[in-house]
Amino acid sequence: MGSFLCYTISMKNTHIEHPEDSILTGDLSVLDWFLAESNISAKIDGAPAIVWGTNPANGKFFVGTKSVFNKVKIKINHSHEEIDTNHQGNVATILHKCLDNLPRTNHIFQGDFVGFGGNDKYTPNTITYYFEEVIDAEIIIAPHTIYSAKSDLRNAIARPISYVQFLQYTINDEFDDSVYWLSPVVMLDDDRHTINNSCKFARQIATLCDFVDVKKATRIKKQLNKCIRNEIDVDDLLLDAIADDNNCDINVLRLWKLVESIKLELFEYIDRYDDVDCYIGESMCDHEGYVISNEFGTYKVVNREVFSFFNFTMEKTW
C-alpha cells in the first residue's frame, strides 16, 4: 500500500545527491531514509530549469533559469527587455513564452521546461515523452520545487514538492489552459521489507569502514561519475583501483556499491500512474528517476548506469 505523505524538508539551493554518495563520509542516516515515511515525486527530464514567481527584492513577477540564484551575475527577468539583455537563442525564446503564460503567484517555484504546445512527442533533454494526445497549451512545465527568500534570491531555501502540494500552494492563483503541468502521480509502498533487511546488512558493513572526509569523498564521486560517463563497469577491480588512488579503505567503496544496490531495489516499491510514455531512442524506459524526501533528507533515486550515461553523452538541443 502506497502513501501520499505531504512531507517536505528545506535545504539550501544545492544539487540533490544520490543516496549512495552520502555514505562515503559515514553518514548512515541514509539507511534510515530508505525506510522512513516519505514524499515522492517523479524526476522529469526537462530542460532548461525554469524559475518563476515574485521577486522578494521588489515585489515584481519574474522568470528565469537557475541563474536567478547567481551570487554575482544575477539574471532575473521582469520584462521581455530584460530577457533579451540576459539571454539569447532558444533559452530566450523559452523565457519569453514563460513570461507571457506562467500564472502570477506570490510564491517562487522551479520546474523543468518540457516543450511548446502543439505536439504529442517531446524530447527536451534525454528522454522522449509520448503523450496520449496533442498538447493544447502554450508551454509544458513540470513543477517540482518551491523556494523561500526574504530579501533576495541569492540565499533562497529550496523545498521539493509534489504536484499535489504545488496545487495547494497555488490554490488562489489564476490558472488557465496556457500551461500544461506535467506531474505523474507516484506512490511509494509502505512495506519495504527487503529494503529493511538490506539496510541492516549495510549497517554491519559500516562497522568495518574507515570513512573518508568531505574533500576525499568529493574526489571519489568525481571519479565514479567519470567511469559512468565512459560506460566503465563499477566492479570490484575498479573499486580497488579507486581505493588505491585515494588511499582509502576499500570497505567504504564496497559499502557505496551496496547502498547503490539498495537504491535500485527501491524501484520495485515505486508505483507510477500517468498518461505519458518514456523512451530513450527506440527503447521504452521509466522516468529519469524520483525525488524522495523525509525527515532524514532529500535524495534522487536514479539508475545512473542508464540515465547518467545518456545525460553526460547525448547532445543537448536546448
Image (spheres, rainbow, N blue to C red):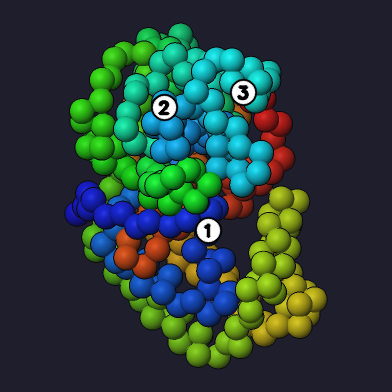
Name the residue carrying label 2.
60
The answer to whether the residue labelled 3 contacts the one labelled 2, judged by CB atoms less than 8 Å apart, is: no
For the question of whether residue 115 can be seen, the reply is no
Residue at 58 percent of width and 74 percent of height: 24
202 over 270 or under it: above or below: below
Residue 212: percent from left, percent from top? 64, 80
For the question of whether residue 253 can be seen, the reply is yes
Q: Which of pointers 3 and 2 lies earlier in the amino acid sequence?
A: 2
Name the residue carrying label 1.
17
Residue 197: percent from left, percent from top? 36, 76
Kindly identify the amino acid type of the residue bearing the numbered disc 1: Glu
- State the separation of the CA atoms marked 3 and 2: 21 Å
Q: Which of pointers 2 and 1 lies earlier in the amino acid sequence?
A: 1
Q: How busy is the neighbourhood of tag 3: few (under 14 within 10 Å), some, or many (20 plus)?
A: some
Residue 209: percent from left, percent from top? 58, 87
Q: Is residue 82 left or right of residue 176?
A: right
Q: Nearer the viewer, residue 173 or 248?
A: 173
Quadrant including the C terminus: top right
Kindly identify the amino acid type of the residue bearing the numbered disc 3: Val
Q: Which mark is residue 78?
A: none
Quadrant including the N terminus: bottom left
Residue 153: percent from left, percent from top? 49, 43
Name the residue carrying label 3.
91
23 over 19 or under it: above or below: below
Numbered disc in front, either 3 or 2: 2
150 over 169 or under it: above or below: below
Kindly identify the amino acid type of the residue bearing the numbered disc 2: Lys
Secondary structure at badge 3 equals: helix
